[in-house]
Amino acid sequence: MEISALELANMLGGTVEGDASVKVFDYAKIEEGKPGTLSFLSNPKYENFLYETEASVVLVNNDFKLAKPTKATLIRVPDAYLALAQLLQFVEAKTRVAKKGIDPTAVIAKTAKIGKNCYIGPFVYIADNAEIGDNTQLYSHVAVNENVKIGADCILYNGVVIYHECVIGNRCILHANCVIGSDGFGFAKQPDGSYFKMPQNGNVILEDDVEIGATTTIDRGSMGPTILHKGVKLDNQVQIAHNVELGENTAMAGCTGVAGSTKIGKNCIVGGLSGIIGHLHIHDNTTIAAYTGITNSTREPGQIYQGIPAQLASKSRRSFAVYRNLPELSRTVYELEKEIKSLQSRLDALNG
């Protein structure tokens, strides 16, 4: 698909600086740009590449200030990264043809309901009373169990498993081998030390526009649902325990774990490898840095936390500065102890 800088700017609501007639037909990272490619600059760390890149067109933020001339034509937009995402989605919609039809190897219960224009791939299993909305695509080896409801325009990639009674909204994307509705980790310890399994009688509810990464697991509630509200985005290999609630547009990076019954607010960001213990309340607009351990509820919205155990980021940075200098501080203390002992010995000799 070939398109001019002017056409791109009109499409994205941006303004052109440079040759508006120059055309692009491919994308490239700014450090790997070649003639005929479109790139973008949103991270200031990559600014030096802007002045060297061979890319024909580069998307930049409206407030970006050039330090020196660049060969590339610039398109200024409010948010370069968002503009690129919108453009890529537009191109994908134009070039990708949605699959339709039911593969003969699929197993579909007589009581299941399949919407219009769906794709049911090889070896898909759809159980009794399950409902699949219009235009939804189920790739090979997807398992949809009893009484599951899946909305319209969803994509379930290979190997996804949806346990009984779970509810999936519209326009949800579930990546390969994720599991929705597995049992929560609930066991009661008996007098002899063995464990008695606590029945998990709830379900999982994913509202509209939720995206779940590959091999992520979302456990069903023990009583009542585990809920991911509209627009939640989870990365690969995330664990969401029973009765957790994630607020609208909260995003969570890979290998994060959230323990049971914790409530996380709207528009939160959780970095990878973070852990959040159970029965906590995380306020709206909270940011949790990567590799952070949250052991207490937050106190107010909009704060940034990091460290193990978590602290406000400003305090954590000060603590780390001290920690980084501990070897020098230890030597200083040791030398001071020696000096004090020497002075004490002299005083004892004078007084003796």
Image: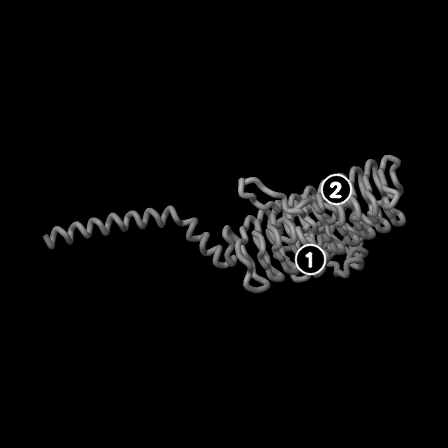
Q: CA distance from mark 1 to mark 2?
A: 22 Å
SS at mark 1? Answer: loop
Quick check: 311 left or right of 228?
A: left
Residue 100 in the image: above or below residue 47: above
Q: Which residue is mark 2?
A: 160
Residue at 81% over, 40% down: 125
Residue 308 x/y as whole percent? 50, 50
Q: Which residue is mark 1?
A: 249
Earlier in the chain: of badge 1 and badge 2, it is 2
Residue 55 x/y as whole percent? 71, 47
SS at mark 2? Answer: loop
Q: Amino acid at mark 2?
A: Val
Outermost residue to the left: 352
Residue 338 in view: yes
Q: Amino acid at mark 1?
A: Asn
Q: Nearer the viewer, residue 281 or 333?
A: 281
Residue 124 x/y as whole percent? 81, 39
Quick check: 315 left or right of 62?
A: left
Q: Nearer the viewer, residue 236 or 78?
A: 236
